[in-house]
Image (tube, rainbow, N blue to C red):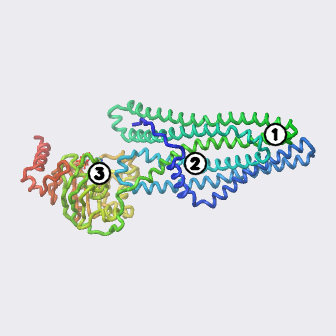
Amino acid sequence: MTDTPKEKRGPLYSQADRDNMRWFWSNYLRKHMGKLLIVLAMILVQGVVFQQFLSMTENGLRVIFERGTLRELAMVCLAVFFLFAVRGLMSYLVPLVTVRMANQAIFEMRRDMLTHLMKLDLAYFERTKSGEIIQRIVSQTQTLGMFVGLGVANAVRDAVTVIIVSGYLIYKNPILFGTAVVVLPFIIWVMNYVSDRVKQAQGEAETAIANYMNGIEETVTGMRTVKISSQEDMEVSRLMQGTKSIRDLLNRVQITQALVMPSIDLSSAFVYVLVIGGGGYMVLRPEFDVDGAGIITFLLGMVMVFDPARLLAQFFGGLQANLVLLDRVRGLFHQTPTIADHAEALAEFDTRADITLDKVRFAYDPEQPLFDGLDLTFAGGKVSAIVGATGSGKTTILSLLSRLYDTQGGEIRIGDTPIDRLKVGSLRGAFSVVAQDIVIFNASIWDNIRYVRPDATEAEVWQAAEDADIAELIRRRGDTPVGPKGAQLSGGQKQRIAIARAFLRDAPILLLDEATSALDQATEERIKAALTRLTKGKTTIIVAHRLSSISDADRIFVLEGGRLVEDGQHDELLAENGLYAQLYKAQKRGYDGR
Ligand SMILES: Nc1ncnc2c1ncn2[C@@H]1O[C@H](COP(=O)(O)OP(=O)(O)OP(=O)(O)O)[C@@H](O)[C@H]1O
């Protein structure tokens, strides 16, 4: 899973890249236009400082070589010092503004990402690796922020310096400058080559890192299985494959980027030779009217152009990598939820009404439909149970009721209202759920229970904890967090937290999916009385394998391979002598040891 497939190489500055930059600009930067203009002004001052420095140096050299006095020389030195002090001040002020601006942009982008993430369908999280999501929100946004905050500001400063100083050099000696520019096509070619390769390698590196993070997460969270099966060495070698491909990819990115500097150095050496040779020739030939001070200053100017040009070239290499990141980050916003509020969605509905599945069609995998026209009605205010072999679709029915997935045909109604005409929040607010896969956060048991109703009073939380028979454990553990995913708790303790949540939430529709399967008989008996109180007057749907625990349900639905094969009360179903009776007898034999 840590293999990194070779990705298709996209064009440089593609339409998508331009769209992404426009998106970033209009959402996160344009609002800081005022500050950006101030930054630009400061950057212009920095460029002008260099031009002034050149002009003063030329004058200073003439003072030295020709007619100068010590006083004049001192004045030139003072002025140069002043100029660089101004440039230094700007170098401090520019990041002061840009860094805050970029961090604010990243802050807002993360806020938008998290908000958007919460809206996405459950299906998105089932097909997307968590490492990929974490990487987008944590490291890719961070790198982008640093790039925007410092990288772009420096690049603008360097570009301004190159333009102003080049402009000045063209003005002073267009022939010599024209000679120097011959290296430009070579530099552009190198830059394109590097950018192209960086873009592809960066894309592959990001995918490899996402897989890697996911692999580590799987290993760490599955450590119990790893240890019991003595697979530590296999896990190390599996993760080392990812470690290796990241090393190789980063080598590729960075070694390619390292091509930039020597090519610029080579070009600058070429240009300096041209300037010294060509300039020297001009000084020696009277028809050019150029003196030594002019040539030395020109050479100094070229040095001052090449240094920022080098950084600028490096910036364009980095820009490709960051465009890849921007594309990944924005990719999250391209994911759209399908389960969302209808334009005229209702907030109020009769939560005690019957719940009807009417010709429901649903498939996780289009090739293998699970329900193909399922009809059944859960009576409002009564206890219904769904039984059937594993994989027959029991949990899926519960998921469809609360719109964790949408049906692909037919409809589900509460009373007369189809559930997709209700506000998703109102619909889900009507459910208390004890699910099979209980999610426990690394907080105290108390906080874990209160999670489903943060406004509950202390007394209400204690009451729910007492009802679920977990209060004693809370008293013993106090505020100690329960470990990642509740690792320090037993299965039964986790289940009791989930039951306490259902008590605390006290919503009108109760879904219990194998809610007491991990409890010992004595604890189950203790909780059962409280659960019976809880279900009073509520529409309750219970999924259970242990048929003895649902024998007093008002109605039992028996599923087989996504089809409803029987329904009725316990005694009726036994009398029918069908699938339910078979399952019941098989379990009874199992318990009796016969
Ligand atoms: N998120 C999912 N993505 C793809 N397939 C799924 C998903 N969840 C369940 N399935 C498949 O759908 C079928 C029904 O699953 P479901 O969990 O509803 O069965 P169940 O009757 O509740 O089983 P169990 O008694 O084992 O809990 C199974 O074949 C399962 O593999």
Does ligand 1 reach within 8 Å of label 2's beta carbon?
A: no
User: In the figure, residue 298 lies in which quadrant?
Assistant: top right
User: Which of the numbered marks, if any, corresponds to residue 296?
Assistant: 1
* Percent coordinates x, y for residue 178 in the rendering: 73, 41
Q: CA distance from mark 1 to mark 3?
A: 82 Å
Q: Can you identify the residue that label 3 sits on?
A: 495
Q: Secondary structure at mark 2?
A: helix
Say which amino acid is labelled 3: Gln
User: Which of the numbered marks, if any, corresponds to residue 242?
Assistant: none
Q: Can you identify the residue that label 2 sits on?
A: 146
Is residue 407 positioned above or below 537 on the image? above
Mark nearest the camera among 3 and 2 is: 2
Query: Going 23% across and 64% down the picture, which residue do you hit?
Result: 538
Q: Is residue 459 visible?
A: no
Query: Going 77% across and 42% down the picture, which residue do you hit?
Result: 175
* Depth order, front residue of 340/580: 340
- Quadrant of the frame with the N terminus: top left
Q: CA distance from mark 3 to mark 2?
A: 45 Å
Mark nearest the camera among 1 and 3 is: 1
* Percent coordinates x, y for residue 37 in the rendering: 65, 58
* 2 and 1 marks in contact (CB < 8 Å): no
In terms of sequence position, does the residue under pointer 1 or pointer 3 come before the other?
1
135 displayed left or right of 268: left
User: In the figure, residue 100 lies in which quadrant?
Assistant: bottom right
* Depth order, front residue of 577/338: 338
412 displayed left or right of 45: left
Q: Residues within 10 Å of mark 1 (few under 14, many from 20)?
A: some
Q: Residues within 10 Å of mark 2 (few under 14, many from 20)?
A: some
Q: Secondary structure at mark 3?
A: helix
